[in-house]
Amino acid sequence: MIYIKSTLVGIVTLFLATIVYIAYTLFMLMRTYSPPPGGMVRISLPELLSRPMYWFIALAAFVLGFYWEFRRAM
C-alpha cells in the first residue's frame, strides 16, 4: 500500500510540474518573442514536452513526490 500511495503522489506531482512548466515556458516565450504585426506565432505543445529540460523536471518531480510520501508513510 505504501508503494501505491507513493506512486500516486509521484504522478500528481508530475502533472503539477508539467502544468507549471508549460505555463512558465509559454510566459517566457511570449515575453521574449513578440509576434510580427498582423501575424501569429505557433507554439507546439509536443515540441515543448520533448525538450530534455522538461524530462529532467518531470523525472525530478516524480521522484520527489514519491520519496516525500514514501518517507512519511514509513
Image: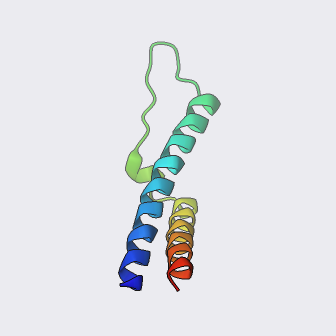
Q: Is residue 22 above or below residue 13?
A: above
In the image: residue 55, left or right of residue 15: right
User: What percent of the width, then of the height, locates residue 14?
Assistant: 46, 62
Task: Identify the residue at image location x=47%, y=51%.
Answer: 48
Q: Is residue 16 above or below residue 25?
A: below
User: What percent of the width, then of the height, locates residue 22?
Assistant: 49, 46
Total residue callouts: 0
User: What percent of the width, then of the height, locates residue 33?
Assistant: 60, 30
Task: Identify the residue at image location x=44%, y=38%.
Answer: 43
Work out which residue is located at the far top of the displayed protein and give it.
38
Looking at the image, what colour scheme do you see?
rainbow
Quadrant of residue 3 within the rendered picture: bottom left
Q: Is residue 40 above or below residue 8?
A: above
Q: Which one is nearer the viewer's eye here, 22 or 1?
A: 1
Work out which residue is located at the far right of the displayed protein and give it.
32
Query: On the rendered image, what quadrant is the N terminus found in?
Result: bottom left
In the image: residue 12, left or right of residue 20: left
In the image: residue 7, left or right of residue 53: left
User: What percent of the width, then of the height, locates residue 8?
Assistant: 38, 71
